[in-house]
Image (cartoon, rainbow, N blue to C red):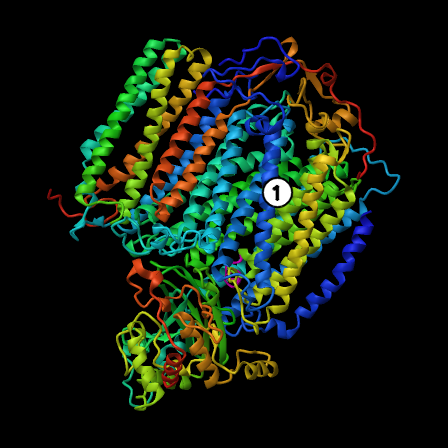
Amino acid sequence: MSQDAAPHAPTSTGIDHKKLIMWLFLASDCMFFGTLISTHLLYRKLYPTGFTDAAGHQQFIQHLFNIELTSFSTFILLMSSFLMALAVSAMHKGELKSFRRNVLGVIFFGLIFLGCQVYEFTHFFHEGLTIQNSVLGSTFYVLTGTHGTHVAIGILWLVLMYFYSFTGKLGGHVGALDVEVAGLYWHFVDIVWIIIFTAVYLVEYLGPSGIWGDGLPAVTK
Amino acid sequence: MSHDTHHAPVASKLDLAPERSDLGFYRPDRTTGLFDWLTTVDHKKIGVLYGAFAMLYFLIGGVEALAIRTQLARPDQTIVTARMYNQLFTMHGTTMIFLGVMPLSAAFFNFLVPLQIGARDVAFPRLNAFSLWAFVFGAFVLNASWLFEFAHLAGWFDGFAWYQALVYTDFAPANGWFSYAPLSGTFGQANAALQSPRFTGVGTDFWIIGIQILGIASLAASFNFICTIINMRAKGMTMMRLPVFTWMTLFTSFLIILAFPAITVALIELMFDRQFGANFFNPSAGGQPVLWQHLFWIFGHPEVYILVLPAMGIVSEILPTFSGKALFGYPIIVFSGAVIGFLGFAVWSHHMFTTGLGPVPTAAFALLTMAIAVPTGVKIFNWMGTIWGGRVRFTPPMVLALGFIWMFMCGGFSGVMHSSAPADSQQQDSYFVIAHFHYVLLGGVLLGLMGGLYFWFPKIFGRMPNATVAYVASGLVILGFNLAFGPMHYLGLAGQPRRTHTYHAGNGWEDWNLIATIGAFILGIGVFTAFANLVWTAFKGKPCSSDPWDGRTLEWSLPSPVPEYNFAQSPVVATRDAFTEHKHGAKRISYEADGGEAGIHMPSQSWMPMLAAAGFLFIGFGMPMMSMGVPHAGWLVITGLLVLIAGIWLWAVEGPGGYMLKTPSVASAPVATPSVAPSAH
Amino acid sequence: MFSRIISRVGLFAVPLLALVLAGCSKAALTVRQSTLDPKGPVAQVQYDVFMDTVWLVLVLFFLVGGLLVYAVIRFRARPGDDTTPIVEEGHGNPLVEVGLITASIGSLVFIAIPTLSAIWYTDDVPVEAVPKSKLAAWYAPAAGAPALDNAVAEQVLEIDVIGKQWWFRFEYPQLGLTNDAKHSVPNELVIPKGVAVRINLRSEDVIHSFWIPKIAGKVDLMPGRKNHLWIQADQVGHYYGQCAEFCGDSHAYMLFRCEVLEPAEFAKWVAAQKQDAAPVAAGSKAEQGKNLFAVKSCVMCHNVGGHFGAGAFGPDLTHLASRKSLAGAWLDNRDLKAQRALEQTSPLGTESSVEVDRATLKANLIKWIGSSGVSHDANGKPTKDVKPGNRMHYYKMFNVAGLRETKQEFTAEELDCLAEYLLTLK
């Protein structure tokens, strides 16, 4: 929605300023998430045995994870990306109504994802994984929480855009561009989640005893 | 959206009726005075503001340095307490790096890049203003810790319950600019209030939030500059015709956007450790303090090149101008800049040779560090090649540029000594290292930046600094600098560790410390003289021609001071060093009347960037005050977040505005007369 | 104009050069913490590599620097010269560029090879040094002491170095000198001459760094991590070391010493360390001091073998009066005038050291203990901290909430008695 790059002369590269700056931001954000994910993986490798709960029992992260739920929320987020693509395409065609419908869908799916994350955090917290009782808790909550914050910012952005579309000022080439830039951000946040889902959740289920080789006992939940 | 608010071009913004933004508010439309400076979106004015703040912080950091040197002049002195000394060197380093050199480089980026590429502004003028104000507020937050410290020392807090409950009473940061965990972090189990036992007080929290805000400012500015350079070049200005300073700006900006995320994450993790009892760097819970060092130096080493590359760019502009010859090996200079930037990400662990990495990583990083000397050497060779066969005219900028090469070369040589890890194990954290990086960052970067100031000052203000004063100041700086830091090579080899607030007599360090202190004061006088000279020139200096040095790049083709629209008509260039070719060669710059009858589109001023950045001011004070236990300080943080969001939202919906400016007919004829034989004056 | 500048700079450069040359005198190279005066193979190797870099850099300096000066002078614009720029795009000269790059890489290989070999050499006790350095080869327990365990006898001597804010604790687990056994050695490391010793580095709080410049370059003590280095000193003497990583308020006061003894002397020293403190004479000031030691909570942190055994947090004081320094080696217990005189005659200050001076030690003790609690000098002013932030302030140090109000108070009389008591701990 930021319309700083007022209609300008054709750019040297032909890429619009706003699109270029979003790509640059995403490059920077790659390093940001890269650092967070590395922190998590390094500590997972160093301390493969999970965490100790308040009662002093050794706990395994696999017992905590509800992989079905997380897979569901991952799917939802992916679908929201699909709707985002439809919204961008609608905007390019100037179909404002279709745009609004799709953006509402994106917002709704994004909220479902956030809801799942809130449920997950509460659940884990009650199971004994806190930010304070282990390195695992610290890296897990800060990594996934930071991603959640990205999703929340995206939702806020889209909500504002949705309402702005009613003022009649969101339209034409500039409007389509603004939506496209928001779409870039949204897709990026989704892609990052795929990586986090793989690196944080899925790898714990590789092989008979988890990728970190911690001798995971049979699940007795 | 309403860039077409005013269809008929006007001679001056003030000819217009006050413009209403999409929100219905009047937009600021002054062209002079305080409100103009606060709401400006003109890259040249923003550049000047960056420069002014940078010089202010240079002086503050310099005073801190002199306090440090005074304390160390003689053994066993107690002029400042141990803690005050630690705060002084922490703030000296942080100030010089983040509030001195980086913003001064940013001043050059802002002022020069659009002029050099033939553009009318940066890609996002309001984002540019936001970067400036975020920097200003971040710098203020960081330095406000001193105010808290002095209030604490004066006993003003004595009556407050939160103050009496404080365990640690350091209010200004005292961890060094590197803030190694766990000294800056926590150790032990968090208590009921979620707070883990720490080693330091709220000074560290001020540092964390201050650097975080400054990081956001730098990131926003860098996105903007990359966009500008890639997207807004004039016709014919291909990448391989870009002035080298613009190239170095591009590399620096890329380094910033790729390196700052690492420190951002590290600071977030450290903040979670301190505020919420997380365990990222808490050794008693399995956290690895060495991770902080890795994250810090993955940022910290590219940061060194973030500081150096702009100065290299400046020198690469000054040398050809005063040698009367094109830069020798332009493609190689550019390419070596890229290689330095790339390798800069692969050598961070040479700051950690003594942390017990093991032989294989140590060997790898030692070799990579040696490798980075090659592109650096290439630059020096090419600068010499530029002088070779030319006609070297001595002017203050040229003398400073030559000083840069010389000092930077010396700093590079001691850098080669560090690259050998076994030798480094004796030098690490000793005064030898201090000598090394001051040769690079002070002898190198500061001389380069001063050269840049003397070089472009006539362009910025249309006035020429007094050359005699400039020579005297440069002489004092070079002399004082060598006297201060030359002996430190010896002190380091004689075993004096850095970051120690005092030392005993009998170790053989006494005499050289005294000499270093004398040198530091001479250096201080020199820098002050140079800055005073420049400030005086800005207001009262002798007006000069628009091209006093016989400059080579597009900015010299413009009148001084540069009009707000930069180019009355957009230039079309046909060669590198376009203006030299234009004046002395066959290929002239042509101009296309892109604006035509419609005039030149100018962006409207705005309060919103500053409003959004002001959110950081609240957050910056709120977070450390929460950490102090000041009641209701959390509301300050929430207010800050709301101000930030509101600022961005209003910014978005107010629209870019804009008006059309009629180009004065006088300016529409580009300056084309070759200047008279330029002299030092 | 430029020649004027050169002559001005030259005016300053001459005395500066003279100063530099004066600084290169032998005495300047052998100061207490000099890295240019190696006394063992590790420091020697590091010094050799350093000198390789120095020679390379000197050559480059004169080559490149000379060329630069030549270029600037040779190609300066003389009055009357036409300074119109040469209009020609500078492409450089590929042959020159490639040649210079190759030459740079070649010169770096010159330092890369010794660097790599030294990295592996300094990492851990080299295999060839083990036979002569294993305990069985040089260490004979004092008469009456139990013989070494067979497995231990085949190992080289290992010393654990534990860093704390702001002092070092040294433990010799193979020889029974550990904190758990109530026989640890604070601040003054003692090693045998001529054999390799493995140093294990641990930290109990923040990062510190272990550095005895004449014996070995530094390695950090990282909390949560096990670092190590090896050292060997080939000359008997008193060496000076210092913490080299910034570690908080009193970082500058975190020093230590290293005494290098002949192997036989070393064995005697080990036996002496295991001795308990002698009983104090009844009715003496020292006995009053001993009581104060308990009453004033010193006993909570400090171990005194044979007298008080509860303390484990602070430095072991059993042999306090035999140590040449106090308070993390910041306060020197020797007669410094005599020591300076000795260092004048024997330029290698590490080779010898005068013995502990009783009066100096007592003055130091009163200063140190007094400043760490609340006491007043002759003018009624509170004494200045010898070491700001040190834990001697806080006898209730585990009660975090009340840290700032828990200083001990001492009268001059009490300080005197305490000092008298501590003086008996030899």
Give the residue type at disc 1: Met
Q: Residue C252 at x, y = what percent?
A: 48, 65
Left or right? Give the position of B87 relative to C267: right
Report which quarter residue C164 is drawn in.
Answer: bottom left
Left or right? Give the position of B375 relative to B84: right
Front residue of this view, candidates B477 and C219: B477
Q: Which residue is mark 1?
A: B55
Quarter of the rendering occupied by the C terminus of chain B: top right
Front residue of this view, candidates C235 and C393: C393
Q: Residue at x 21, y 40 (%)?
A: A205
Q: Secondary structure at mark 1?
A: helix
Q: Residue at x 44, y 52 (%)?
A: B156
Magenta portion: prevailing SS class: helix
Report which quarter residue B390 is drawn in.
Answer: top right
Left or right? Give the position of B402 relative to C273: right
Using the image, determine if residue C120 lies above or below residue B593: below
Report the residue that reaches farthest toward the left: A220
Using the image, determine if residue B53 lies above or below residue A180: below
Front residue of this view, candidates C112 and B680: B680
Q: Residue at x 73, y 14 (%)?
A: B665
Over which residues does the magenta segment extend?
B420-427
Is residue B8 something that shows in the picture? Answer: yes
Left or right? Give the position of B267 relative to C353: left
Q: Residue at x 64, y 50 (%)?
A: B443
